[in-house]
Structures are given as C-alpha cells and as structure tokens.
Image (spheres, helix red, strand yellow):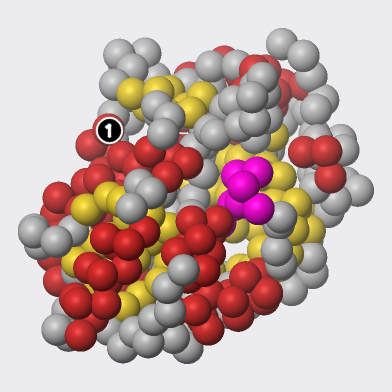
Amino acid sequence: MEYQDIFAIQNSQEFEQKALEVFRYQFEHNTVYRSFCDLLYKHPSDIKTIEEIPFLPISFFKSHEVIASQKETEAIFTSSGTTGSITSKHYVKDLSLYESSFQKGFTQSYGAIEEYVILALLPSYLEREGSSLVYMVDHLIKESTHEDSGFYLHDYFALSEKLKNLDTLGKKILLIGVSFALLDLIESNRFSLKNTIIMETGGMKGKRKEMIREELHATLSEGFGVSKIHSEYGMTELLSQAYSKGKGIFTTPPWMKVLTRDPEDPLTILPHQKAGGLNVIDLANINSCSFIATQDLGSIYPDGSFSIIGRFDNSDIRGCNLMVL
C-alpha cells in the first residue's frame, strides 16, 4: 500500500478518508488486528466514520507481533521497562517512513531542523538498545549540521558549559531530555537562557518520584530561566509525535489524530473536552496498526489539540483485554 500520500493530507475530510482506507487495509493484512475486530464483530462494511474503528489495546505490542506487511523487518523498537517486565516491540518494516514522519512533524512544529543546535540528554534511552526516541534524535542531530549538536550521557558539567556558551552566542538551541536528567542538570547548575527551547520527553524511569506536569514544568522553568517548557509525546508503538510548546497542550501533525474513549466503555468515543482514555490514529503506522488505545488519560480540545492528565492504574484498561489469540 502506498503511504507517502499521508503526508499530503490537508484537512479533516482527507484524514478521515485516508484513515478508513488504512483501516480496510490493516483489517485484511494484520492478522492480530483482524482477530481483534472479528471478536468485536466489526467489519469494514460496517465502519463509516473514524469513531467507529476499533482501537487495538497498546498492550498487544507486548504479547504479539503486530504487523500488516510481509516486508523484511528493518528495525525492532522496544519500550523501556523495569527489570523483568515485558516490553513492547514495534516491528518496523520501513525506516524511511519513520524518518519522513519525524522529520516532517518536527519541521511543521518548529521549522527547519538545520537551524537548530540540538543537544540531547537521554541517559536512560542511550543505555539500552532499540529506542525509537534515540533513533529519531540521532537523525535530527545529524540533520542539524551543527558541530555542537550531540548526545550527552552523564557529563552534566560539559553540557551546562556548552549550553551557556551557545545561548550567550545567540544560537538557536533545542535541549531535549528525559525529565529526571533535566532535573539532575538544574540541581547543580543555574541558567538564564534566552535562545533555548527546553523539551522534556516525560518519565522519571524510576530515578525520581513522579511529579505532576505543573510541578515539573515550574521547577524546570525556574532552573533553566525560561518562561515555558516544551514537551514531546511519542512512544515505541507509534511512528509519529505530538509536540507541546507550553502548558502541556499538544498538537499533532495532519496524519495523526487523538480521540478520547469512555473509561467504562472503551468502545465509546467521548465528545471534546471530556476526559477519557486516549485513542491515537497514527497513519504512519501503516505497516503495523494505526489505531491504538493507549494507557494515557487526557482531554481533547475543539481544535484537535489535547492534554495528558494521567495514566490508567495497573496499566490494564478495563474492557480492552477482550481476547487471547
């Protein structure tokens, strides 16, 4: 199935048309998703809107090979997890599709990648194999073409000096980091940055106690001397990202859409601004499954942007684990 035309989507009508086309394709070619739909008695002939499409519980990426293509697997992205826990696996059949998605998505939100010095503070991701985030940031660093762009592991002193010097020189900087590492950085350093975007990717990874977004962003804003903190919303199971430029309000690229479902009835889609479980349509997931019921809780706004308010307890969504294949 051709996929590059998903990046030409211009409006909601084109998105819905393409999403229904992708649903029909994945129903026929993804055996795990087909079995899930069959159990729900959902057939493409019955599906007329995206709200009627079944959303596969994200936990299936832990227990099954969720694939809709017989192409050779080019990469396997794995989720982070505690020792002994089962991790998600995303079998990526076409890395160029992932690259197109994150390159175009970043450019639409922030402009040309080449304009930025990209500094990455992702210790927990760099210390394991199979991180889709590291793959993305590594490509963004290479595309920035700036000699100072790069990864930092635990050398906070070198990073702080580099960051202060570049910011003073007026360089356009993006510092992307996992939450606990950004907090570690400001514990031993204080900044007053004028030309730097601070972007957190979420997660304490067991290194610190979890914090609500408002507390985390207030702490980071004070420590870096910036007025707002940006965020990236992505996961192993998706090939597209949403970005927030402040206040935890995320926007998606045109080939990605987020809906909310009723926590008590996961097959029911909720109206805007009513909190519920987040369902993600990611058309870049053409070779796996584009319709994912995540474990996040959030709200959708009338313009299609969304916010995260938490996660389901115990990571099991009631009513979604309907089948054992």
- Looking at the image, residue 109 lies above or below residue 128: below
**Residue at left offset 39%, top offset 81%:** 191
Task: Determine if residue 49 is in view.
Answer: no
Quarter of the view holding residue 131: top left
Pick the front one: 165 or 200: 165
Q: In this view, does 211 lie to the left or right of 50?
A: right
Is 203 a magenta residue?
yes
Q: To which quarter of the image does residue 259 belong?
A: bottom right
Q: Position of residue 118 (x, y in %)?
A: 24, 62
Extreme-right residue of the structure: 264
Image quadrant where one finds the C terminus: top right
User: Which of these two is toward me, 147 or 315?
Assistant: 147
Residue in the picture at 67% in, 76% down: 214
Residue type, mark 1 in image = Leu
- Placement of 234 over or under 300, stated as above or below: above
Residue indicated by mark 1: 95
Residue 261 lies within the magenta run: no
Q: Position of residue 255 (x, y in %)?
A: 41, 55
- The magenta segment is 202-208
Q: Is residue 87 above or below residue 9?
A: above
Residue 120: x %, y % from top left: 32, 55
Q: Residue at x 59, y 76 (%)?
A: 219
Q: Nearer the viewer, residue 195 or 238?
A: 195
